Structure formats: C-alpha cells, structure tokens
Amino acid sequence: TLNPRPAQAQTQPIIPTVSVNGSAQIKVTPDVIYLTIKLDESDTKGKVTVEQQRKSMFAALNKCDIDIEKQLSVQGMSSEFFRRRGSLAATQYELKVGSAAEVRKVFDELEKVGVVNVNVARATSSKLDEYRTEARTKAMQNAQQRARELAEAVGQQIGACYEINDYTTTTETVYGKRLMMSNAVMMDSAVAEAEPNVEFEQIVVNYNVSAKFYLMTEIH
C-alpha cells in the first residue's frame, strides 16, 4: 500500500518592505574659539623679555574684557627658560573666546603691543551635542519621508518601521580665511579693507541613517 503523500509545508507569505537612507545637515555658528598666543624672546632678538611681553599681553586682554583667570591658560614653556642666564625663553598660552568679533578685537589689541605670534587653534559649539541629536532626528524624518514617497508612487503606504541603522555623525569645522592668518598678516591694512567682515564659517554637522518600513496596500 502506498503511503499517502505528506502535506506540503505552507509557505510563509512575503511581506513587502521598503529600505531607504536618510540624511540631515545642520550648520552651526561657533561660539567657543581657542587661540594660541606665543610669547617668544627670539621674536625681538632678546630685546623684550617674556615677562615684559606677558605684562603687555595682560594689558591688551584687559582692554578686550577678557577674564584672564578663566579664559587664559598656559600650554607650556620652553626648556630654555630654565637654563643659564641670557638664553631666550618662550611661553605659549591658550585663550578661549566666544565669537569672531572677539577674536578680531584680541588680534587688534595684541598687535598694538607687539604680540604678533597669535593663531586660531580650533573652534566648536557649546551646544554641539544638542545639534547632533537634532541632526539625528531630522535624518530619521528624512528617511521616513523618502519611504512614504516611494510607497505612494506605487499606490501603497508605509507601515511600521522595523529596522533602523544609526550611523556616526561627522562634524567639520571650517574657518574664515582671515582668522586663520597670523596676527601680523591679519592686521595688514590691505587685507582689512578687502575683507572687513570675514567671520568663521559654520560648523557642519552631518548625520545618516538607514531604515526599513513595512508596505501596505492603500484602501480607497
């Protein structure tokens, strides 16, 4: 007797889905800017000591309403500072300011007292984490909108999102050309006339996600 044919396994229905990428970009104006100020006796061939330059620097920064105790820190001193008398010394400071306008004022006042070894080190935003969170949210909303548009193009609509891949954010800081120059070059009259209102370019926060949504047939 022939054995009866086993019942065929039921096949699972294919659930239609749509996969999309989402992205967002937010531009932020820097509000935390770090300058490096180097006091070096070799700049004056030993004619002006680091201590004299330091006093001049403090006087210039006071004119800029800088809180020296909170905004200025020592980064390092040349080892030559501790050697035999007559050797040339150097000290480097880091100054924290809050805007491009304040940077220009600092450059201007320092140049007046002969402190010319000043450069912009880096710039950031005090609310950068908040902007990254905002970019992440906007990237997901962008992915959802793309999925919705694709579904509607074929007469369907999207359902629940069942998978999200969250990519690391990238942040790029671009500086205004004039503010990256040395103090001496920056204060050149020809440069000042050509670019009177140069500011820091904005910080660019990019965020990317990928997401998958279920597809459902629209009911009319």
Image (spheres, grey):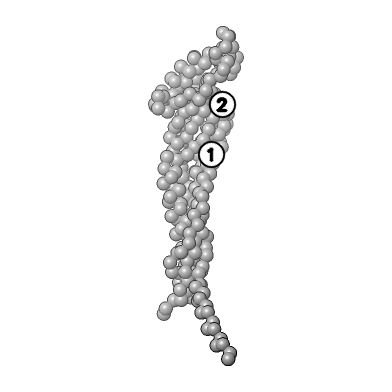
Residue 29 in percent (x, y) is at 46, 42
Q: Which mark is residue 144?
A: none
Tell me the amino acid under the disc marked 1: Tyr
Circle 2/circle 1 CB separation < 8 Å: no
Q: In the displayed image of the protein, which residue is found farthest to the bottom?
A: 1
Taking depth in this image into account, of 117 and 91 the one nearest to the observer is 91
Residue at image position (50%, 72%) is: 16
Q: Is residue 71 visible?
A: yes
Q: Secondary structure at mark 1?
A: loop
Q: Quadrant of the N terminus?
A: bottom right
In the rendered view, tell whether residue 201 sits above or below residue 91: below
Residue at image position (45%, 55%) is: 138
Tell me the amino acid under the disc marked 2: Ala
Q: Is residue 189 visible?
A: no
Q: Secondary structure at mark 2?
A: helix
Which residue is denoted by mark 2 in the rendering? 184
Residue at image position (59%, 17%) is: 42
Q: In the displayed image of the protein, which residue is found farthest to the top?
A: 85
Which residue is denoted by mark 1 in the rendering? 175
Can you tell which quarter of the image residue 220 is in?
A: bottom left
Neighbour class for label 1 at 10 Å: few (<14), some, many (≥20)? some
Residue 118 in percent (x, y) is at 53, 27
Taking depth in this image into account, of 112 and 173 the one nearest to the observer is 173
Residue 73 in percent (x, y) is at 46, 25
Neighbour class for label 2 at 10 Å: few (<14), some, many (≥20)? some
**Comes first in the chain, label 2 or label 1:** 1
